[in-house]
Image (tube, helix red, strand yellow):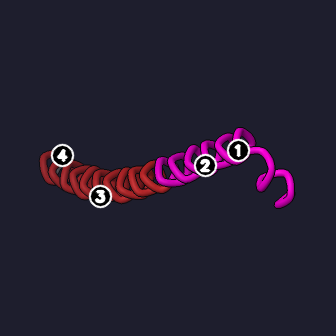
Amino acid sequence: MNHILETDPEEKKKLEAIKMELHEKKDELEGVIDLQQALVVQERKTNDELQDARKKLISVCIFLSI
């Protein structure tokens, strides 16, 4: 493989382009993973808030039915 790259500059350019594209895709994937993690945290926070509101609503309904 190294012999081909040493003798063919076009192949070397193609390989460098592929490496650059792979690096960009890796960076993009890391960004998507970070976004996904942030969304999971936000979803959990929202779910906790909804559960608290549900408990308060049930308490008020029980109080009003007495």
**Residue type marked 1:** Pro
Real-space Cα distance between discs 4 and 3? Answer: 31 Å
Quadrant housing residue 59:
bottom left
CA–CA distance in space, label 3 to label 1: 54 Å
Q: According to the image, label 3 marks what residue?
A: 45
The local crowd at label 3, few if under 14, some if 14 to 19, many if 20 or more residues have their Cα within 10 Å, is few
Main SS of the magenta part reads helix
The secondary element bearing badge 1 is classed as helix
Mark 3 or mark 2: whose residue is earlier in sequence = 2
Left or right: residue 25 versus residue 54 is: right
Query: Which label's residue is closer to the chain start, 4 or 3?
Result: 3
Q: Earlier in the sequence, mark 4 or mark 2?
A: 2
Magenta segment:
1-29
Of the numbered discs 4 and 1, the one sitting upstream in the chain is: 1
Q: Residue at x 46, y 48 (%)?
A: 32
Tag nearer the camera, 3 or 2: 2
Which label belongs to residue 9?
1
Where residue 52 appears, x then y in whole percent?
Answer: 24, 58
Q: Identify which amino acid the numbered label 3 is placed on.
A: Lys
